[in-house]
Image (cartoon, rainbow, N blue to C red):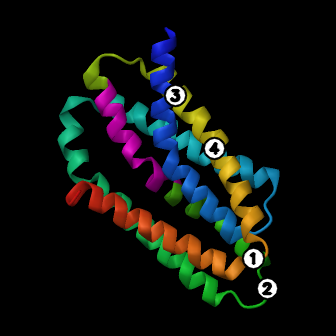
């Protein structure tokens, strides 16, 4: 593998990790102080799914491309919009005791939904890679997974640093950002 190919894969990884990074920042805003374990959890979930989805897409190949391209934006929109709306709702429902909210925000169900929502585009990228016959999926998936792992953990930390003092407004802002991302993804596919 030459330097140009590595550069291309790194750019793929940066592009695909952008949504995961933004969502991790929002999760950090909502969580307040985070632990190394939580940063690793977010990195593993997002990095793992960002590596898994293009691998699945690669093996689905040409036949599924039309199906995924037609609906990926709707799936991402629904998931991100629902998560953002739920974050806003939870920010007003939290009372004075926030201890349980941090744990709940890193639950299996919550992390699974976020990981799927941020990696749907990676499925389509995997299909495109298969059709181009230019990329090998193992190094591509590894690069995407590692870059997303690092950026997601860093995003969670950055969000927590900025969100600790302003937890409720930050949670609302995080929810609004997720809803904005949902609308942007939908708009990018339907109107722009």
- Element under disc 2: loop
Task: Say if 174 sits above or below 140 in the image.
Answer: below
Q: Give the range drawn in magenta.
A: 115-129
- Disc 2 to disc 1, how far (Cα)? 7 Å
- Tell whether label 3 touches label 2 (CB within 8 Å): no
**Circle count:** 4
Q: Name the residue under label 1.
A: 100
- Which picture quadrant has residue 28? bottom right
Considering the numbered disc 1 on the image, is that residue within a helix, a strand or a loop? helix
Label 4: which secondary element: helix
Cα–Cα span, label 4 and label 1 = 26 Å
Instruction: Report which residue position mark 3 lands on.
Output: 10
Q: How far apart are marks 4 and 3 (CA)?
A: 13 Å
Q: Is residue 11 visible?
A: yes
Frontmost of labels 2 and 4 is: 4
Tell me, for residue 97, which label it has, or none: 2
10 Å neighbourhood of mark 4: few (<14), some, or many (≥20)? Answer: many
């Amino acid at each position: 593998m030459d330097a140009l190919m590595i550069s291309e894969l790194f750019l793929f990884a940066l592009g695909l990790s952008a949504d995961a990074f933004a969502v991790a920042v929002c999760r950090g805003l909502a969580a307040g102080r985070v632990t190394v374990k939580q940063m690793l959890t977010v990195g593993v979930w997002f990095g793992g799914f960002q590596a898994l989805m293009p691998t699945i897409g690669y093996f689905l190949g040409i036949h599924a491309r039309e199906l995924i391209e037609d609906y990926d934006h709707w799936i991402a929109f629904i998931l991100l919009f629902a998560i953002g709306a739920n974050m806003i709702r939870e920010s007003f429902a939290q009372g004075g005791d926030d201890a349980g909210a941090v744990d709940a925000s890193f639950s299996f169900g919550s992390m699974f939904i976020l990981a799927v929502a941020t990696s749907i585009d990676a499925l389509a990228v995997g299909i495109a890679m298969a059709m181009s016959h230019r990329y090998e999926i193992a190094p591509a998936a590894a690069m995407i997974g590692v870059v997303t792992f690092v950026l997601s953990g860093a995003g969670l930390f950055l969000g927590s640093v900025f969100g600790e003092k302003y937890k409720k407004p930050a949670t609302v802002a995080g929810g609004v950002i997720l809803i904005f991302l949902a609308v942007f993804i939908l708009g990018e596919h339907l109107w722009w």
